Image (cartoon, rainbow, N blue to C red):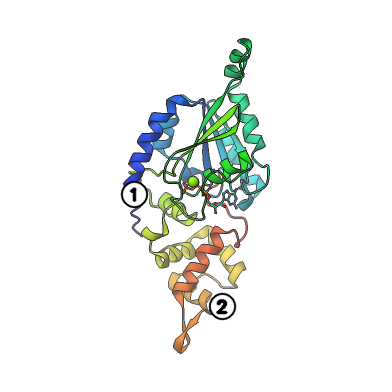
Amino acid sequence: MIINWFPGHMTKSLREMEEKIKLVDAVVYVLDSRAPFSCINPELNRISEGKPVIYALNKSDLVENADISRWITKLSVNGSTAVKLNSTASNATKVLADKLKTVCAEKIEKKKAKGINAVIRAMVIGVPNSGKSTLINNLCGKAKTITGNKAGVTRGQQWVKITPQLEVLDTPGTLYPKLDNEKTALNLAFIGSIRDEVLDVHELALEMVKNEILKEPIKLRYGVEPSEDARMTLAAIARARGFLIRGGEVDEERAAYAVIDDFRKGRMGKIILEKA
Ligand SMILES: Nc1nc2c(ncn2[C@@H]2O[C@H](COP(=O)(O)OP(=O)(O)OP(=O)(O)O)[C@@H](O)[C@H]2O)c(=O)[nH]1
Ligand SMILES: [Mg+2]
């Protein structure tokens, strides 16, 4: 499957992030817990270099706790830390606000010695649809940023004041321009980080039903044994779901949308595509 996945506007987004990085004390690097490795890209690493990084393993509600714990250990190296988050749960991001204070403790203490309350500024970065804007809304307890269940919702940067002592910068989701690893591209497409408009939904669903990790969950969800022939599997899913078109033919397209949506919404169970 060929994925044309780097829209031109991302170059501009990356450049704008590079300009603002000087102004921030820390970086919150938001990863989708279902595919943390694919969410880490060299461009974002380069931009955050030299700043304390807190990895936010977001959408943790969609994977098993044990898998998250292993990723937290793996990512907590070289001065970086990691926290487990479900940004859709109320007050779930307090742990992140506390971590920001910890990594900026030196600045806070220095200002305090001068009788000033430090203002901590953090840039929130990550691939599209990883939940950056939702996380920010959770931090401030208000819908200050626009969120949406698709890639590319945030179009420009936006500062959000969380408290008088904490400000965060929302950024548009960005990908890596030169990605030649098909597995990473597919994982990003599975989790909804690549705009569906540039993907062939039917082909994407075929890739899903072929995926080793998804075989068992597909069997459990649809009562269909994935076969060697991905189209046959998709047709069997359509039949099992009663997705038929006139003449009794199976509606593969509808099955394709269902498979993708079921995975993304966690209806196939807690699935991690990349273990630590
Ligand atoms: N299950 C679950 N869904 C989440 C979580 N965080 C965000 N979402 C959902 O993920 C989708 C994308 O959220 P956004 O906050 O718009 O993502 P974003 O990273 O800002 O996306 P871009 O602006 O496109 O880069 C929305 O449907 C959110 O409700 C989470 O922790 N768990
Ligand atoms: Mg956003």
Q: Residue furthest top?
A: 114
Say if disc 1 is inside 8 Å of ligand 1. Answer: no
Task: Decide: is 237 above or below 117.
Answer: below
Tell me residue 8's x, y (percent): 31, 46
Amino acid type shown at disc 1: Pro
Crowding near the residue tagged with mark 1, few <14, some 14–19, many ≥20 C-alpha atoms within 10 Å: some
Say if disc 2 is inside 8 Å of ligand 1. Answer: no
Residue positioned 49% across, 72% down in the render: 255
Tell me residue 125's x, y (percent): 48, 38
Seen from the viewer's position, the closer of residues 221 and 158 is 158
Residue positioned 49% across, 49% down in the render: 129
Place residue 157 in its image quadrant: top left
Task: Decide: is 175 above or below 240.
Answer: above
Tell me residue 166's x, y (percent): 58, 29
Q: Which residue is mark 1?
A: 7
Q: Which numbered disc flags the more N-terminal residue, 1 or 2? A: 1
Crowding near the residue tagged with mark 2, few <14, some 14–19, many ≥20 C-alpha atoms within 10 Å: some
Relative horizontal placement of residue 270, taking residue 198 as reference (left or right): right
Amino acid type shown at disc 2: Ala
Seen from the viewer's position, the closer of residues 161 and 203 is 161
The Cα–Cα distance between marks 1 and 2, rounded to whole angstroms, is 37 Å
Residue positioned 55% across, 50% down in the render: 34
Seen from the viewer's position, the closer of residues 112 and 87 is 112
Query: Judging from the image, what secondary structure is the residue with disc 1 in?
Result: loop
Q: Which residue is mark 2?
A: 240
